[in-house]
Amino acid sequence: MEYLRYQFHLAEAPCAVTWKEFDSFVEHVEINSASVQPVLAWVEQHSETGGAPKDEVYSEVLSASIKRRLVHLEKAADAVPGREMNLELKNAAKLLDLIEVLMIKIPESIGDTFSPDSSQISKLFDQIEQYFAWRSTPAYRSARRNEERLLKRIFKTDLGSIEPWLEIVGLKDGYRHHPEYGDEWKALIKNFRETLRDRCSLWLISQLLKKAEFLRNVLRDEKHGYLYMELFFDLEGPVWNKHQRQLLSSLRIKTGNTILQTNGYEILSWLESLVTDNREYVNEARSILQKTDFATALWKACVSEPLNPKAVGSLRDARDILVSFGIECETPAWWCRIVKGLPKKTRE
């Protein structure tokens, strides 16, 4: 029945690479971690012969490599005789070399023409995680070392944006990856998370200059905004401890950057509302507004260019809070003129 389903699927949506073609490719093409040209040549030739786009052939070969490798790992786990187990592990190792060529070597060699997608990276992570605690024999231990080396290379290469990595490894302990997979796996993922927190923090800071409506489009983004918000309010985290210099540098730019001024205005108004209305993160908001260098730079960004009376009225209370925290908030001449004409704001 499974065979018939496969045949019906081929008839309705032909594959760029069939399993028969893939197995023949693995059998006859020399594959090792340095064999870029033979693999690339096969992909290009198969594209010309079959008519499928090269990137589609590449993607299907990569997906097939990940799936077929899992088959060998499952057989090795079920195999009782050592010779059979070692043979399956050898086949799995060959496919790991192929995956390294496809995921790292080829993109490094020819650029972004071919690159793995996030689902393929995620499937490889899940697959390696499943067997990472299996270290009972020299063959298994060797396999684990090679898998760890490849995962580190993939992560270091920083393929694509940071968004896929938030799905793959997360930013918190316990996300997707479970204790039963062993201490070695937990240590590896912890290392990835620490690096990812750094990447996310730097990305977060960079968006102040690039992303209009930072509060809505980044910190309140429907998909990962809650993670960015937690990073922003983690006073012991990389935004405030490791990358505060970059944060201040982003705020201290020449006048005329309307994105930065608008974002600064949003952030200061938001932090002020958290403090005065005693909302969630009130303690963190107070602590952030009491950071002299940051608060001063944020204020200067807000008033770098003339604002309309409504914006000035909104920032007036925020300035009062900053001053109460001992922050010097110099006001330009245009600010003073507008404030004189505003009614005294009262808070219900």
Image (cartoon, rainbow, N blue to C red):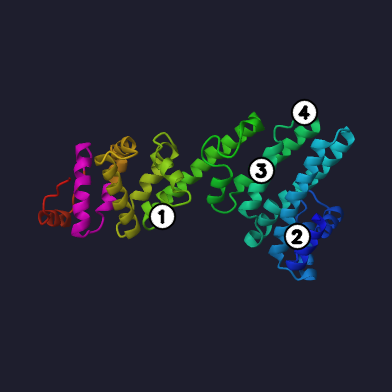
Judging by the rendered image, the residue that carries numbered circle 3 is: 126
* Residue nearer the viewer, 51 or 44: 51
Residue 321: which quarter of the image?
Answer: top left
Q: Is residue 122 left or right of residue 213?
A: right
Counting residues from the start of the chain, the first of labels 3 and 1 encountered is 3
| Foreground disc of the pair 3, 2 | 3
Q: CA distance from mark 2 to mark 4?
A: 36 Å
| Foreground disc of the pair 3, 4 | 3
Query: Residues in magenta?
Result: 299-328
Please state which amino acid type lies under the numbered disc 4. Answer: Ser
The image shows residue 225, relative to residue 50, as above or below, that is above
Counting residues from the start of the chain, the first of labels 3 and 4 encountered is 3
Disc sitting over residue 217 in the figure? 1
Is residue 95 covered in magenta?
A: no
Q: Is residue 337 left or right of residue 67?
A: left
| Foreground disc of the pair 2, 4 | 4
Question: Which type of secondary structure does the marked residue at label 2 adopt?
Answer: helix
Residue drawn where x is 78% and y is 41% of the image: 73
Locate the N terminus by quadrant: bottom right
Residue 110: which quarter of the image?
Answer: bottom right
Judging by the rendered image, the residue that carries numbered circle 2 is: 40
Q: CA distance from mark 3 to mark 2?
A: 26 Å
Counting residues from the start of the chain, the first of labels 1 and 4 encountered is 4
Locate the C terminus by quadrant: top left
